[in-house]
Amino acid sequence: MGIETLPFSQLIAEVVDNRGRSCPTVNHGVPLIATNCIRNELLYPTYDKVRFVSHETYATWFRGHPLPGDILFVNKATPGRVCLVPSPVGFCIAQDMVAVRADTRKVYPKYLLAALRSKVVQDQISQMHVGTLIPHFKKGDFDKLLIPVPTPYDQQFIGDTYFELSAKIDLNRKMNETLEGIARAIFKSWFVDFDPVRAKAEGHDPGLPTELADLFPSSFVDSELGPIPEGWEVKPTGDCVTCVKGKSYSSAELKSSTTALVTLKSFDPGGGYRPEGLKPYTGGFKAEQVVRSGDLVIACTDVTQAAEVVGRPAIVQSSDAFDSLVASLDVLIVRPRSPRVSVPFLYCLFRTDAFKDHTYAHSTGTTVLHLSNEAVPSYDSVVPSPGVSRRFDALATLLFAQADKRERESRILAALRDALLPKLISGELRVPDAERIVGRCV
């Protein structure tokens, strides 16, 4: 396979660059994508904590807008993160990133995305960016960034394979978001809005199977949280769970090991768990600090505040790379000790706006937020009757099990993709051999 090396600048037909000044924002309008929305493990940008610009600003302020198929390249804070621009676009970009349009006469666009994410190119970017507190990569250095460019046929195979595997992973992620959304919607309907009880109290059909509807009462009683279903209780979370604080550690203990720490980076910005956030760990720990698959953890530190991580829950998944997991000091393990609350119930409870507000009210610090020890135990919530609790647990467990299955599939696909990419780009693995491997695995 013939491979030449060309400067990144020579592979680009156009650059959309709106950096240099902040654009005016509004409460509603066209989403404004920021650098936190660009992640190398995702095919397209997310919409995490987006701001908005007016339609007038969109039409007049920007120098240009990305088109479908362009590549977003982050220049500041996390230089080198890249994502594809979807179709339709649906957003605009401002400072700290550019959109680059591949010159299709020289490079296959999907291959360019794969090459930019490869270790050989990412290593160059990390060596070339400047700044210590806030790293940035100058657009003027695009001509110094060298991209391996194989034959057109090989480019297309590499680019299409990378894209198809990533698209499957992306689809699994979206389906998992839908499954979690269903579980949270049921939780809100049953345990926040009390829809079935309200319907029965008003003489309406709650819209549930008879055997399920019969589990809900048909009246309310007063409580310190306001009216709640008759027979249900208000309890502090501490009466229903055991909280275990994670292990403090030093950088000297972060060495190659079969044990890993569950850290702040294990919490996905959009919600849920990220296996990539694990850190190899060689230090000691207590038995209760061991995290098992299915355990519920909560982030109890927020290093930047901007991420809004403190108080966020995640359900830990099994790890293919490590034999055992341990909670770090920034992580709180929350284990149910009442049959009326389960991990799915607590996860949905901890994803509510009310719990989020409670945790921020019980956090201290300015630059770094720390969740107080009493934050989780002191949170009062409505505990349903055992019958309703069991039915919700069965429904949510089924939904989360489906999501876990898709997540395991995604990890396998990601491992295949990330193992093939460097070997194909370097020429160590020939395309015909890779075609046979991919055909057997997908």
Image: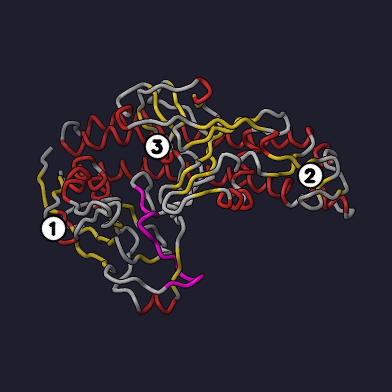
- 309 relative to 231 in the view: left or right: left
Farthest residue to the front: give it: 365
Q: Measuring 39% from the left and 37% from the top, which residue is drawn there?
A: 277
Q: Which of marks 2 and 1 is nearer the N terminus?
A: 1
Q: Measuring 29% from the left and 69% from the top, which residue is drawn there?
A: 18
- 37 relative to 239 in the view: left or right: left
Residue 412, x across and y down, in percent = 39, 31
Give the labeled residue for mark 3: 277
Question: Relative to 79, is 342 above or below?
Answer: above
User: Mark number for residue 208?
Assistant: 2
- 155 relative to 53 in the view: left or right: left
| Distance from Cα at disc 2 to Cα at disc 1 | 62 Å
Give the labeled residue for mark 1: 10
| Distance from Cα at disc 3 to Cα at disc 2 | 40 Å
Q: Is mark 3 on a helix, strand or loop?
A: helix
Q: Is mark 2 on a helix, strand or loop?
A: loop
Q: Earlier in the sequence, mark 1 or mark 3?
A: 1
Amino acid type, callout 3: Gly
- Specify whether residue 34 is painted magenta: yes
Q: Quadrant of residue 419?
A: top left
Q: Which of marks 3 and 2 is nearer the N terminus?
A: 2
Assess disc 2: are there few (<14), some (14-19) or many (≥20) residues with their C-alpha within 10 Å of its C-alpha: few
Amino acid type, callout 2: Leu
Q: Nearer the viewer, mark 3 or mark 2?
A: 3
Assess disc 3: are there few (<14), some (14-19) or many (≥20) residues with their C-alpha within 10 Å of its C-alpha: some
Residue 132, x across and y down, in percent = 23, 51
Question: Relative to 432, is 359 above or below?
Answer: below
- Asked if the residue under mark 1 is in contact with the one under mark 2, i.e. CB atoms within 8 Å, the reply is no
Q: What is the magenta range? A: 25-39
